[in-house]
């Protein structure tokens, strides 16, 4: 994907977030970009393809953040938090109205996005669990494949409109409780000590 194509997708995403998918036409996107519709159609055949490419770009961006985490000499717990936040923030970008629109008007594309997202994040999380065990931070008796799948499903469920509407909780609170419970379930004594020290330092930094 070249820079021009990516710029088109990002601008389209901004318009979709602001006005909704259905209310934005290809002409609106071309006008926002300062290009002709003919130029726009050199990159995508139709609006459905544009939506599909935009969702795939979101997956690609999370993958880039995962790579950056793994090259910064962070341990498994730090990486899991960073990757989980990246996934959650990216999914949060799909606000409830957009999710409803995708489910109603682009069901096949949305389902494919969720499946790709699930499989992609699963591999990242599974690799993280293996790393955590090697580093002596996670329990060595974990059923890695199963626990990875359960964790990924939690990340996805957090952004289900029906799930979110069932309680008066902020996204940050849901993420905090989910991540805390998960770490306490997979970490060994060394991992818990490190995690609790990180929480303590974070609290000190945010509450001077």
Image (cartoon, grey):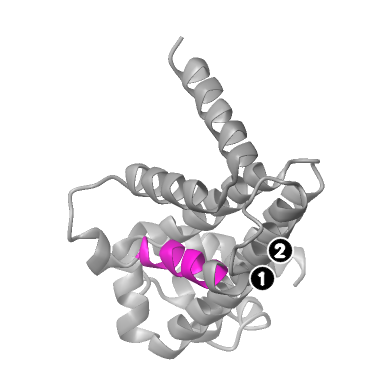
Q: For label 1, count other residues whose C-alpha is less than 10 Å away and answer few (under 14), some (14-19) or many (20+).
A: some
Which residue carries the number 1 mark? 123
Identify which residue, 36 or 23, lies in the foreground.
Answer: 23
Q: For label 2, count other residues whose C-alpha is less than 10 Å away and answer few (under 14), some (14-19) or many (20+).
A: some
Q: On screen, 38 above or below 146?
A: below
Say what secondary structure mark 1 lies in.
helix
- x then y, percent, for residue 125: 62, 62
Magenta segment, principal secondary structure?
helix
Q: Is there CB contact under 8 Å for labels 1 and 2? A: yes
The image quadrant that residue 194 belongs to is top right
Q: Is residue 144 magenta?
A: no
Say what secondary structure mark 2 lies in.
helix
Q: Which residues are magenta?
A: 148-159
- x then y, percent, for residue 74: 74, 41
The image quadrant that residue 10 belongs to is bottom right
At 51% from the left and 85% from the top, the residue drawn is 112
At 69% from the left and 52% from the top, the residue drawn is 132
Identify which residue, 18 or 189, lies in the foreground.
Answer: 189
Q: CA distance from mark 1 to mark 2?
A: 6 Å
Which residue carries the number 2 mark? 127
At 63% from the left and 51% from the top, the residue drawn is 138
């Amino acid at each position: 994907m070249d820079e021009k194509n990516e710029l088109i997708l990002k601008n389209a995403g901004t318009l979709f977030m602001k006005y909704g998918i259905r209310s934005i036409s290809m002409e609106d996107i071309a006008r926002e970009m300062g290009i002709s519709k003919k130029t726009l159609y050199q990159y995508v055949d139709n609006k459905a393809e544009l939506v599909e490419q935009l969702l795939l770009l979101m997956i690609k961006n999370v993958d880039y953040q995962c790579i950056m985490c793994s090259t910064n000499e962070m341990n498994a717990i730090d990486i899991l938090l960073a990757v989980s936040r990246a996934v959650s923030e990216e999914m949060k970008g799909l606000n409830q109205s957009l999710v409803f629109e995708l489910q109603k008007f682009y069901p096949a594309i949305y389902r494919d996005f969720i499946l790709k997202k699930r499989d992609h994040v699963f591999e990242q999380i599974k690799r993280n669990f293996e790393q955590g065990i090697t580093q002596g931070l996670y329990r060595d008796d974990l059923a890695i494949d199963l626990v990875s799948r359960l964790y990924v499903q939690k990340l996805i469920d957090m952004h289900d409109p029906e799930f979110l509407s069932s309680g008066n909780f902020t996204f940050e609170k849901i993420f905090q409780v989910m991540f805390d419970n998960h770490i306490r379930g997979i970490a060994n004594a060394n991992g818990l000590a490190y995690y609790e020290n990180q929480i303590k330092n974070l609290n000190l930094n945010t509450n001077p």
